[in-house]
Amino acid sequence: MTIRTEKLDRLAELTARRDTTTGAGLWTEALRRLRGSKMALTGAAVITVFVVIAVVGPWLAPHDPTAQTWRDEVFVNRALFVGPRSGNWLGLDHLGRDQFSRLLVGARHTLLVGVVSTLIGLVAGALVGGVSGAALAFGGRAGRGLDTVLMRGVDMLLALPSLLLAVSVAAVMGQSLTTVMIAVGVVQIPVFARLLRGSMLAQAHADYVLAARALGVRRRRVVLAHVLPNSLGPVIVQTTLALATAIIEAAALSYLGLGNPDAAQPEWGVMLAQAERFFVPEDLLDQASLMAVCPALGIIVTALGFTLLGEALREALDPKLRG
Amino acid sequence: MLRLIVRRLLQLVPTLLGLTVLLFLWIHRLPGGPASALLGERATEADRRQIEAALGLDEPLWVQYGRWLERLARLDLGTSTQTSRPVWEEFTLRFPATAELALTAMLIAVVVGIPLGYVAARRRGSWLDAAAVSGSLLGVCVPVFFFALILKAVFAVNLGWLPSAGRRSTGIDATEVTGFSVLDGLLTGEWDASLDAVEHLILPGVALASIPLAVIVRITRAGVLEVLTEDYVRTAESKGLRQRVVRGRHVLRNALLPVVTTVGLLTGSLLSGAVLTESVFAFGGIGRFVADAIDARDYPTLMGFILLIALLYVLVNLMVDVAYSVIDPRVRVN
Amino acid sequence: MRIISPRTAKILATVVTAGVIVTGCASDRDDDGSGGDSGTFVFGAAGDPASLDPGLASDGETFRVTRQAFETLLATEPGGTELVGGLAETWESDPEGTEWTFHLRDGVTFHDGERLTGEAVCANFDRWYNWSGTYQNTTLSYYWQAVFGGFAENESEETPDPNYVGCEAPDELTAVIEVAEPSANYPGGFSLDAFGIHSPKSLEAYAQDEAAGEGENITFPDYSQRAGTVAGTGPFRVTDWDKGNGEVTLTRFDDYWGDPAGVGELVFRTIPEEDARRQALQAGDIHGYDLVAPADVATLEADGFQVPTRDVFNILYLGITQDRQDALGELEVRQAIAHAMDRENIVATQLPEGGVVATQFVPHTVDGHSEDVTTYAHDPQRARDLLAAAGHEDLALDFCYPTEVTRPYMPAPADIYELLRSDLEDAGITVNPVPLKWNPDYTETTRDGGCDIYLLGWTGDFNDAYNFLGTWFADYSKEWGFENEELFAMMAAASSEPDVETRVGLYQEINEYVMDFLPGVPISSSPPSIAFSPDVNPPTVSPLTQENFAEVSFR
C-alpha cells in the first residue's frame, strides 16, 4: 500500500488551497461529483450488498454453517465432493457442511476482520502521524526532533515487507482472530501515519492557519480545531482503500496458515485457504474447484467494491485528475 | 553524488542500530525458541537445554546482542539455526532468485505499465482507457496467491507451455557465476540455460507483477493527465512544436516523476508478494526462507534479513534520487 | 551444449511479442528430464536434505537421498518390514543378546574404490562412538544416542551412558559388535539409515574437517554439505548438490555389487508445497513425489499416474494428558472420549486407501500386535452415560491440533480435528480449540503436557513393537501425565528380553493392558501415498517409506 502515499501527500496539498476554514466547500463539491460517477455508484452498490449480507446473512442461511450434517457423503480421500443440489445450492464443503450457508455467514466475519483491522491501523497511524505532524509544524526544534524519530520508525516499517511483518506479529501473539486483525492492522499504521502528517503539514502553511497563529490562537487549539479536521480528507480516502487491502491481506495470512484458528467459523479467507488444496486446474467449475472459487470471488468482488469507491472518492477530491 | 551516497550511508547507521535492538527484543519474545524448533517431536527437555547452551541462548539478552554486534563488525552474520549453515551463505544462495524474480516483475510492470498508462491517458474515455483502468483496479483486488494459482493451473498444468515450479529444468547444465540464472547463462555463453531460466521466470514474474503493474498504469495515467493540463504543455503545443517533442520532452518526462518514486516505494510490497509467489511456484528465494525462519525462531537469519532489507531500501531510494535528477533537471544533484 | 529447441525459441518469441499464440501440450515437457544413459529420474522432495552424511541426520528427507548412496549392515526386505541381510549376508548374536556378529558380503566396493572389510565396519562404529564436541548434540547424533546411548567420553551430563562397548574384526569379512545391555533396539537398529557404512578413506577425510567446527554454532561439517567427499557402497553416488536450486544429483555407481541402477541419473528436487509437487508431476517436470494428499490420489490415478499402495506402519492417536484435569484421570471419562469418537468416518473419508481404524498403539503389521484387546465402538449415547456415571457431564477439554503440517500418519490434521470436535460435542463435551504451529509450538506444548487432548502419531523405524510402545509408555512423561508402575515394569521386562518370541508375547500382553488402561485413543494406521509418472517402472514401495530408487527405470 505504500505506493499510494505519494499521491495522497499531494492530495493533502490540494485541500490546503481552499479559502474556507470549514470543509463544506470541498466536500459538497466532491459529493456532487461522486453522484455522477459510475465508479462510485458501482462501488457503493457492491459494498451495500456486502454489508447487507454481512448483517442479515446468518438469518438467511438455510443451514447451520458449522454443522457437519452431510459428512458421510463427502470423501476427501477419494476427491468425491458433493456439488450443487436442491437443499445445498452451492454444494457441500470438504467436511459436509452447506457451502451456501457458509458463504453467507462468512461475509460477516470477513467484514469484521476488514473493519477492525483497518480501524487499528487508522487509529494508531493517525495518532503517530498527528503527533508527528503537529510537532513538526508547531513544536519548534524539539518538535522537529520528535518528528524525525517518529518518521524514521515509520519509514522503516514502510520498507519492511508487510506480509513478513504480519507473520511476525502472528508468531509473537499466537494464533487467534484478534491476532489476524492486529497483524493486518499493524501493516497499515505507517501508511496512515505518513498520510496524516503530510496532510497536516500542508494545512500548516495555509493562510488561515498563519492568520489564526498571528491572532494569537493557541497552538493546541489551532491543531485540534483547524488543522486536524481539514487534514482528514485523504485519510478517509485511504480508509476506504485500506478496507480492500485488509480483506486481501487477511486472506494471504490464512493462505500462510495464520488465519482464524477456529476454522469451523466460516470466513472467506480461511475458506479459500482451506479449499485451495482441492483445486482442480483442469476444471474450474468442478465442485472441488468451486469450493475455492466461490470465496475467492467473494473476496475479489468485495475488495473491488471498496477500491472503486475509494478511487472515485479520490478523483472527486482531486479535481486535477478529472481534467 | 558521492557525498550524497556517503551521507545516506552514515545516516543509516543510527537507524540500523535502533532497528536491530528493537528487532532483537521483538524476536526474542517469540514463544518457543530455535532449540525446540530444531528438535521437533522427538526431543527431550535435556536436549533442549543442551542446544540452548550450545547456541548461547542461556545468557542475558544484552550479552547476546553484544555478541551479535561484535560478529557483525567482523562481517559475520552468524549461523542459521534452521539449516546450520552460515546466514551469509544462505542469503547469497537465495537472494539472487528473489532479486531476479522481483526485477522481472518490475520490468514487466514498467515495460507494460508506462505505455499502457500513457496511451490510456492520451485516449481518455476510449475503450482502451476503460480497459486499462478497470484492469488496474482488478489487479490490486485479486489475492496474489490466488492469481498465481490460476496462472499456474492454466499455463503450466493445462496448456503445458511453461514450467510449473522451480528455477531450472533438470538436464540443463548451468554454471553458476552470479547466482542470477539468466545472467549466468549469458556470461558463460550457455544460451539454453538462459532461455530455460527465462521460461521459469515468466509465470511467477507475471503473478508478482500484477500489483505493481496495476499501480504503475494508474500513476502514469494520472501523471500524464495532470501534465497535459499544465500551461507549459499547452504553450508548447500552441507554439507548434512537433507532437513527438512535446510528448517526449514535456509530457512523459514530467509524468514519470511520480512513477519513479513509486517504483522505489514498491520494493517492500514486492518482497511481500515474493513470499507468496515463491510458495506457489516453489521458487527457491529468500522470501519463503525468511517466513520459515520466523517459524523456526531462526534469530540470526531474521537479524541478517533486516539488515539486508534496510540496505536495500536505502539503495533503491538512492537510485530513485539519481533517476529523479536524470529526468528532472530541477532536482539535479550536484 | 544444446542448440535452442524450437519450443524454447517459440516461448522466447512469446515473451518478446507479449502474448502471441503458442501451440504446445503437456507432453512437450516430458522429454526435458531424459539425458545420460537410460535417462534421468527426477523425484520431488518436500525439503532439502540436512546433510549428505546420514549419521548426522534424523529426518526422512535426508535419508531418502542418502539411502541411495549408503547401505547398512542389515536391511529390510523390499516391500516389507522383515530384517534381511544388507552389507552383512548373515548375522547372529550370543544368547545374552550383547554380542552381535556380522558376516559381510564379499566383493563390495565403495564409491572411492576401497573394499568393504570388517575393519572398515569397525572404523565406522568407532568413529560414531568417539564423536566429541558438537557431534554429541542430539541434533547431529540423534539415532546414535537413541540406539547405542552415549559416547566414549560424554561431554554433557544430559547425554546417556554408552551402551556400545566395542567392535572387532576377527577376519577380513567379519565384524563383531559388543554392547553392554541387551535391548529391543538390536538387531533392528543395525538397519537404520543413520548407520550407513562409509568408506574408510572418506572417514579420514571427514576427520580433517571436524576440527573446523566452531564451538558455539551447531554447524554441519563441510564434507557433509557438498558432493565429492562422502562415499558409501550404494547403487548411486552423490555427484552434485546444487543448494540454490534445491537439487541433489546422484549418478549410477558402475561397480555396485548388486543389480545396477535402472537409470543413469537420479535427481531429488526440493518443492516444499504439496500442491506444487502435484502440479510439477502433472506438468511433467518431475517423475514422482511422496506424501501425496489423499484427495489427489484419485485425480492422479484417473490421469494415468501410478499411485502404488504401501503397507501401513504408523499410528495416529488422540493423546490424553491425565494429570492436567482430575476428570481425565478417571477411566470412565477416557472411555467416554473413546466411545464418542467416530474413527470409522475419519478412516473412510480422510485417510488414503489402505487406512484402517487402529485398535491399539501398534499397527497390525508389527509383531506384538494383539487380537484380544478391548475395543471402543462409536456410541455417543454410551459416551454420555459414562460421563454421567462419572459425574462429569460438564466436561470441557482443551483440544490441541497442529496447523500447516502433513505427517505420514496424518494427512490433514485440521480436518481430522474438526471431525473429532464435532463428535465430542455430540457426546456433550465442550471443546476449546487450541491450534498451534507444528514446529516448535505444537510439539513443545504437547510434550510439556500443555493440552488436555491432542493429535499425534508415530512412524516405526524398524519392526519391533518397542519402537512404538517404548516411545510412549516406558516411563512417566508429561505428555501422558500418568504414573503406572505396573505398566512401566512390563515395558522394562520386554525391552531386556533377548528371546524374540518371548518378547513378542510380552508385547501382546502390554497392548492388551494398555487398551484397558486407555492412556489415549489410537485412531488409525494409514499408508502415506507416493506417486509416479506413467512412463516409469516404480520401485517396490515400502511400509517404512524406504524406497530403493535403483529399481526405477523408464518404460
Image (cartoon, rainbow, N blue to C red):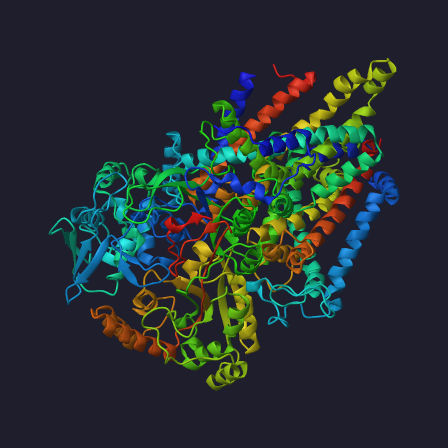
Foreground pick, C498 / B230: C498
Image coordinates for residue C84, horizontal then vertical, percent:
27, 60
Among the 4 quarters of the image, the one containing residue A265: bottom right
Left or right: where C237 falls relative to C352: left
Number of numbered discs present?
A: 0
Query: Of all residues shown, which one is farthest toward the front?
Result: C555
Among the 4 quarters of the image, the one containing residue C147: bottom left
Foreground pick, C302 / C335: C302
Among the 4 quarters of the image, the one containing residue A287: bottom right
Q: Is residue C154 above or below residue B302?
A: below
Q: Residue at x 55, y 58 (%)?
A: C301
Image coordinates for residue B225, horizontal then vertical, percent:
80, 28
Q: Quadrant of the C terminus of chain B?
A: top right
Q: Is residue B51 visible?
A: yes
Q: Quadrant of the N terminus of chain B?
A: top right
Q: Is residue B226 above or below residue C435?
A: above
Foreground pick, B257 / B59: B257
Image coordinates for residue A192, horizontal then vertical, percent:
67, 41
Query: Of all residues shown, which one is farthest toward the left?
Result: C170
Left or right: where C128 falls relative to B263: left
Image coordinates for residue A70, horizontal then vertical, percent:
63, 71
Q: Is residue B210 above or below residue C72?
A: above
Q: Is residue C183 above or below residue A206?
A: below
